[in-house]
Image (spheres, rainbow, N blue to C red):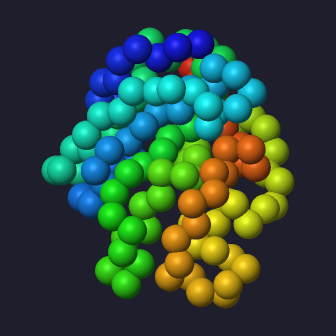
């Protein structure tokens, strides 16, 4: 499935005042990391975040959020980490505990480090469901 455009969603408030870009990561294959996707600038006024246009029942997706990595200031944006939609009504897959799930290099014990490993292979995805059944 290919997502071609992104529009603001009424119920998705995934944006923050510090994120710079949010990239929906649709599942075009078994590996979300390999799927080329469009991205949009995040809304600086903390308005609802982007939602892939034309999502149909069964669409499986995640988000990657770009912004500053400044842990001392409370900003830990890491586009290498696939995030679920906090408003998703369906989730698929399982979590396989792996150091790649953490935004920092877990092995070092220093939570101020940046971890560049992709978490897509180890985490769950959001799924669009039919609202008629909610």
Q: Position of residue 86 (x, y in %)?
A: 52, 46
Q: Nearer the viewer, residue 113 or 61?
A: 113
Task: Give the residue displayed 33% in from the left and 49% down from the top.
Answer: 15
Looking at the image, residue 121 lies above or below residue 61? below
Task: Give the residue displayed 47% in from the left and 17% down from the top.
Answer: 3
Q: Nearer the viewer, residue 59 or 129?
A: 59
Tell me the quadrant of the picture where the C terminus can be found.
top right
Looking at the image, residue 130 lies above or below residue 105? above
Tell me the quadrant of the picture where the N terminus can be found.
top right
- 2 left or right of 29 in image: left
Q: Position of residue 82 (x, y in %)?
A: 58, 47
Task: Give the residue displayed 25% in from the left and 40% down from the top.
Answer: 41
Q: Nearer the viewer, residue 52 or 2?
A: 2
Q: Position of residue 112 (x, y in %)?
A: 50, 82
- 65 left or right of 29 in image: left
Locate residue 90: give its quadrant.
top right
For the question of whether residue 111 can be seen, the reply is yes
Q: Position of residue 85 (x, y in %)?
A: 53, 42
Task: Give the residue displayed 57% in from the left and 53% down from the top.
Answer: 81
- 29 left or right of 95 in image: left
């Amino acid at each position: 499935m290919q997502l071609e455009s992104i529009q603001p969603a009424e119920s998705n408030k995934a944006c923050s005042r510090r994120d710079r870009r949010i990239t929906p990561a649709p599942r075009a294959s078994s590996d979300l990391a390999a799927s080329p996707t469009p991205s949009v600038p995040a809304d600086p006024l903390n308005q609802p975040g982007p939602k892939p246009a034309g999502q149909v029942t069964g669409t499986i997706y995640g988000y990657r959020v770009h912004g500053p990595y400044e842990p001392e200031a409370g900003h830990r944006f890491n586009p290498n980490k696939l995030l679920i939609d906090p408003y998703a009504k369906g989730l698929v897959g399982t979590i396989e505990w792996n150091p790649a799930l953490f935004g920092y290099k877990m092995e070092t014990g220093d939570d101020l480090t940046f971890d560049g490993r992709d978490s897509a292979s180890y985490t769950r995805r959001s799924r669009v469901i039919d609202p008629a059944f909610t």
